[in-house]
Amino acid sequence: MPQYTFIFGNHPVLSLAELCRVFAVGPGEVVSLYPTAVTLKLSLTKNEVLAHLPGLGGTTKICTPLPSVPDQDKENLVHVIVSWLQTIDNTGKLSVGFNYLGPHPLDLNEIAHLAKALVKLRYVLPVGGVHLSAAQITHNQLDNEKGFDLNIIETPTGYALCSTLAVQNVDFYHDRDEGRPLRPSDEGMMPLKLCQILLNLALHGKNPITVSAPLVLDPFCGSGTILQEAMLMGYQTVGSDISKDAINTAQANLIWFAKKFQKWIPLQANYALLTQPAQKIHQALGMEAVSAIVSEGFLGELFLRPPALEQIHHQNQQLIKLYHEVFVALRKVLRPEALIVMSLPYYLQSKVSLLELILDDIKQIGYNLESWFEEDLSARLSVLAIQQPTAYGSYIYSRPRQIIGREIIILSKT
Ligand SMILES: C[S@@+](CC[C@H](N)C(=O)[O-])C[C@H]1O[C@@H](n2cnc3c(N)ncnc32)[C@H](O)[C@@H]1O
């Protein structure tokens, strides 16, 4: 069965969870797992696997695995790279780009130089970092038959190597993000890749979606970021927000999006927008009409500096009441097999979780907290030095300098 290495972005646990759901990966398919990448055995052709790349928010590259290096000795690393290059049927000079992923520094210049002494080679090194940009890869023709983009991944015991088959299209992300006509500065916007990950988590659950035209709901839709990415995946969508301004913003953005990206949006995709509080969404939508709920919940007051515990406590009292009503209403519109993937506010500096306070209530309302991975994979994950789901089953997503992080949960109906 062919093997493929998937190189992750900045949130390897989310990326891995997304991949496992999209490819319905069982424990037997995971050949090797590193902090920054995974190799999977998939009974899919190269083109079938690569066709998934634009829809995978957490994967930056899909690669072919190469022989690995069983220790962290630099000379052995060069030897394995050179042995691989010598197997390539090529007349003339090989072009090879070098990338490194790992916790410890590795001098790519030295590795490339040592390799060049042993095999005819033109090498390309990252500018001011350890990864070649997508532009460098394309510009230097490392993504076609004339060249190779080599990834060196530090593992707990040595190095894994893989050669890139395709890279995430950064320009496409840039165009659909930066070009949006209205970008709210106060509430913030969901990063597009995170939207894709959450949508994939929600739409590839254990129980397949049975309706022919699944409807995706974002009940706190803000500027409509999640709706736009769901449309690109081909879903019918409905967004609601308590604020008329937010709905107007989403409307302007989605009109722009539907026009500008028409040729990429599958025909069946569409959107509807409602000005409606989330706690009353069942009054606007039919019972069990929704096949997935993906949302970034209301964060409460947006503090300019880390709030004191007292402020957080005060805020959480209001949010606890709101989210109780919201989860009661959402359960009514959700199909029996459907999932909710939602982010709730998490106060990063004081490590206060709203979810922890409402988890029992959520279960009482009639939800299960879904686990992120099969048991076997969780055990393998626990040896890697990366941030993992919390003990109570959430994942905290944050970016540098944020005050409020996003605590992500996956819920199913009991
Ligand atoms: C964190 S923002 C969502 C941002 C959105 N994901 C985006 O990318 O633009 C939360 C949104 O929840 C809305 N909101 C606040 N309370 C609400 C409620 N009770 N029901 C529905 N929406 C609410 C706010 O108006 C805001 O637009």
Image (cartoon, rainbow, N blue to C red):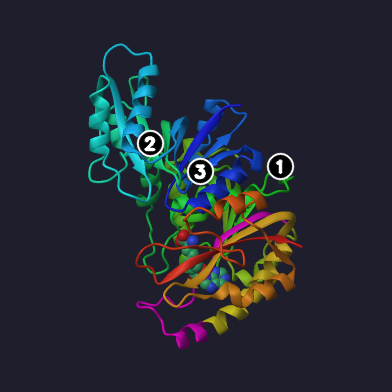
Q: Does 259 lie within the magenta span?
A: no
Determine crowd level at label 3: few under 14, some 14-19, many 20+ residues with C-alpha closer than 10 A: many
Q: Does 311 lie within the magenta span?
A: yes
Residue 7 relative to residue 400: left or right: right
**Identity of the amino acid at label 1?**
Ser
At horizontal 41% and vertical 39% (from top left) the residue drawn is 71
The residue that mark 1 highlights is 212
The residue that mark 3 highlights is 56
Quadrant assignment for the C terminus: bottom right
| Coordinates of residue 150 in the picture (x, y in percent) | 36, 32
Q: In the image, which is nearer the foreground, mark 1 or mark 2?
A: 2
At horizontal 60% and vertical 32% (from top left) the residue drawn is 42
Q: Earlier in the sequence, mark 1 or mark 2?
A: 2
Up-down relation of residue 226 to residue 306 (above or below): above
The residue that mark 2 highlights is 151
**Identity of the amino acid at label 3?**
Leu
Determine crowd level at label 2: few under 14, some 14-19, many 20+ residues with C-alpha closer than 10 A: many
Q: In the image, which is nearer the foreground, mark 2 or mark 3?
A: 2
Asked if residue 248 can be seen in this view, the reply is: no
Q: CB atoms at circles 2 and 3 under 8 Å apart?
A: no
- The magenta segment is 289-315
**Identity of the amino acid at label 2?**
Asn
| Coordinates of residue 12 in the picture (x, y in percent) | 48, 51
Up-down relation of residue 182 to residue 100 (above or below): below
Q: SS class of the residue under badge 3?
A: loop
Up-down relation of residue 1 to residue 280 (above or below): above
